[in-house]
Amino acid sequence: MHIHWLAIGLAAVAGFVVGGLWYGPLFGKAWMRARGISHEQAAKGNMPLIFGTTFVLNLIAAFMLDHLYATYDAPLGLHYSLVIAAIVGVGFIATSIGVNYLFSRQPRALFLIDAGYWITIYLVMGAILGLLR
């Protein structure tokens, strides 16, 4: 198996950027409202630890997606890499979050924000991996 380190690294960085936009200007206020977190509470977090760990987790996710693509014999290309990324994002991640949020009685808005983020991040990572593999 050939590991595509450049594509994995770029996919992880792109995931980090998407997260900054998603939970910042796009849905940050709605997410904090749905979570019941104030700006003051959010500012008290250990941001270097949160951001550093988030990047490492994005790196692992990108690596695993690349590894999943490597299990296919045929060259994937952009179309199939996006299809597989959508299957992962919608079929595994969003459904798992949905079950957890149902049982913990989280607001629907929070589910839509968080599940939408994961679907988007996997599509972005899939596009990068599909184009650079």
Image: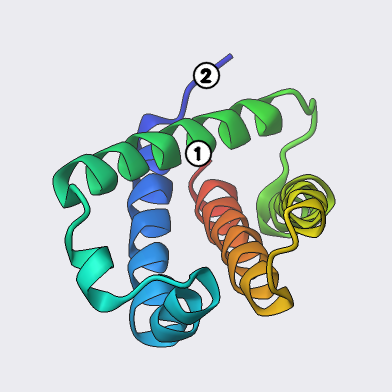
For residue 23, which quarter of the picture? bottom left
Horizontal and vertical percent position of residue 50: 27, 46
49 left or right, relative to 33:
left
Query: Which residue appears at 34% of the width and 77% of the height?
Result: 24
Q: Earlier in the sequence, mark 1 or mark 2?
A: 2
- Residue 111 relative to residue 59: left or right: right
Q: What type is the residue that disc 1 sits on?
A: Ala
Tell which tag, 1 or 2, sits nearer the viewer. Answer: 1
| Residue at image location 53% in from the left, 52% down from the top | 125
Label 1 belongs to which residue?
A: 62
Closer to the camera in the image, 95 or 67:
95
User: Which residue is identified by label 2?
Assistant: 2
**What's under tag 2, amino acid-wise?**
His
State which quarter of the image contains the N terminus.
top right
Image position of 124 with respect to 1: above or below: below
Question: In the displayed image of the protein, which residue is found farthest to the top?
Answer: 1
Above or below, comparing residue 47 to residue 73 in the picture: below
